[in-house]
């Protein structure tokens, strides 16, 4: 058997997205063959163009809401396809619901057919506007199912439910990662999320648009740390949801002030109305990930944000 055939094969749905492309890089560096599937509605081919010509990497332009047929063996399915920023899922409510439900069903079906391990990219949005702080995996959440964010939150909650059903009923090797706010190179400048929004505004001397009074909190994880936690979880034998994120919490106002200071921008802060159902606090409890996976973040916010600003400097 040739060396190529003995490599594990990973399928990454959403493989041209922010997280999917970083995951693909990590898997290739681990010696996997990678098949990235993306319909490019929020993903971007530029995120994977450095992989063109790599014989272990293949890109398929496909919407995973439609049946996924792939010939050959598959060892791992990483299901990352979904619009993921609040602006994206407000503009794409039905594709968001469909990829979380039908797309997850198809991705699980592929993993089942191939006897592959499966991981679902779930989200801290499953906790909604949380009444437990920091959030632990055993908290069931406080989600408004019919609010504007419900399309994402409920799709991901359904995705978790069907993943656990396939695990319990079909005895599949499945995993669920609840991803907290993550940042780094390859985020879309205009995806509406606070990290690219503030950096883009600061670099062009436009006002930084704080929604509400800026007292809401988030906890930002650098992308390489997140991918490392996810890789470890896939390789584990744990099947219930695990939080992966950085517990360093800050208010959105503190985040804006940090960006203003580090970029030396002349931009001021401007306050805008708070979007409906915007969570007031968010911070992962990562005790489970530490215990199970020996994982915790390594990249300090101050370092990760410098790398991210450098990435955006050439792109504003
Ligand atoms: N936010 C903000 N200004 C912006 C974009 C976002 O103040 O231009 C706030 C948003 O209201 C939320 C936080 O920043 O409280 C994080 O928003 P993001 O869209 O990054 O993701 P979320 O954590 O809400 O899913």
Image (spheres, grey):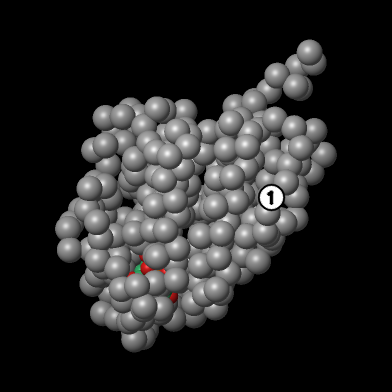
Quadrant location, ligand no. 1: bottom left
Indicate the quadrant containing the C terminus: top left, top right, bottom left or bottom right.
Answer: bottom right
At numbered mark 1, what does the secondary structure look like: helix, strand or loop? loop
Indicate the quadrant containing the N terminus: top left, top right, bottom left or bottom right.
Answer: top right
* Residue reaching furthest to the top: 1
Q: Residues within 10 Å of mark 1 (few under 14, many from 20)?
A: some
* Residue reaching furthest to the front: 169
From what the image shows, is residue 310 above or below residue 168? below
Question: Would you say 179 lies left or right of 3 here?
Answer: left
In this view, the residue in front, 140 or 169, is 169
Q: Residue at x 50, y 71 (%)?
A: 89
Residue 299: tell me if it is visible. no
Question: Would you say 204 lies left or right of 59 here?
Answer: left
Residue 211 % position (x, y): 35, 79
From what the image shows, is residue 213 above or below residue 78? below
The count of marks equals: 1
Question: Would you say 119 lies left or right of 13 here?
Answer: left
Q: Residue at x 46, y 42 (%)?
A: 166
Q: Residue at x 29, y 81 (%)?
A: 212
Residue 229 % position (x, y): 42, 37
Query: For residue 191, what is the image quadrant?
Result: bottom right
Q: Which residue is mark 1?
A: 68
Residue 95 % position (x, y): 58, 69
């Amino acid at each position: 058997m040739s060396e190529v055939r003995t490599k594990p094969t990973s399928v990454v749905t959403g493989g041209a997205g922010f997280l999917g492309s970083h995951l693909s890089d990590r898997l290739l560096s681990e010696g996997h063959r990678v098949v990235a599937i993306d319909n490019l509605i929020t993903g971007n081919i530029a995120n994977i163009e450095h992989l063109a010509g790599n014989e272990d990497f293949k890109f398929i332009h496909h919407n995973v809401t439609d049946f996924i047929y792939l010939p050959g063996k598959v060892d791992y399915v990483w299901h990352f396809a979904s619009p993921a920023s609040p602006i994206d899922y407000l503009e794409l409510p039905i594709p968001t619901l469909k990829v979380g439900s039908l797309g997850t069903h198809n991705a699980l079906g592929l993993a089942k057919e191939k006897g592959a391990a499966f991981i679902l990219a779930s989200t801290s949005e499953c906790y909604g506007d949380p009444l437990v702080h920091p959030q632990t995996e055993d908290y069931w959440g406080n989600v408004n199912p019919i609010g504007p964010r419900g399309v994402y939150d409920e799709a991901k909650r359904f995705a978790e439910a069907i993943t656990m059903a396939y695990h319990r009923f079909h005895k599949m090797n499945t995993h669920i990662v609840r991803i907290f706010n993550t940042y780094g190179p390859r985020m879309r400048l205009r995806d509406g999320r606070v990290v690219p929004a503030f950096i883009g505004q600061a670099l062009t001397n436009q006002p930084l648009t704080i929604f509400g009074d800026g007292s809401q909190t988030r906890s930002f994880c650098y992308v390489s740390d997140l991918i490392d936690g996810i890789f470890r979880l896939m390789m584990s034998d744990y099947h219930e949801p695990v939080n992966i994120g950085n517990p360093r919490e800050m208010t959105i106002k503190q985040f804006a002030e940090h960006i203003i200071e580090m970029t030396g921008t002349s931009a001021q802060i401007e306050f805008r109305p708070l979007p409906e159902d915007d969570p007031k606090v968010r911070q992962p409890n990562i005790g489970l990930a530490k215990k199970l996976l020996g994982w915790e973040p390594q990249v300090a916010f101050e370092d990760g944000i410098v790398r991210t600003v450098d990435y955006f400097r050439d792109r504003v």
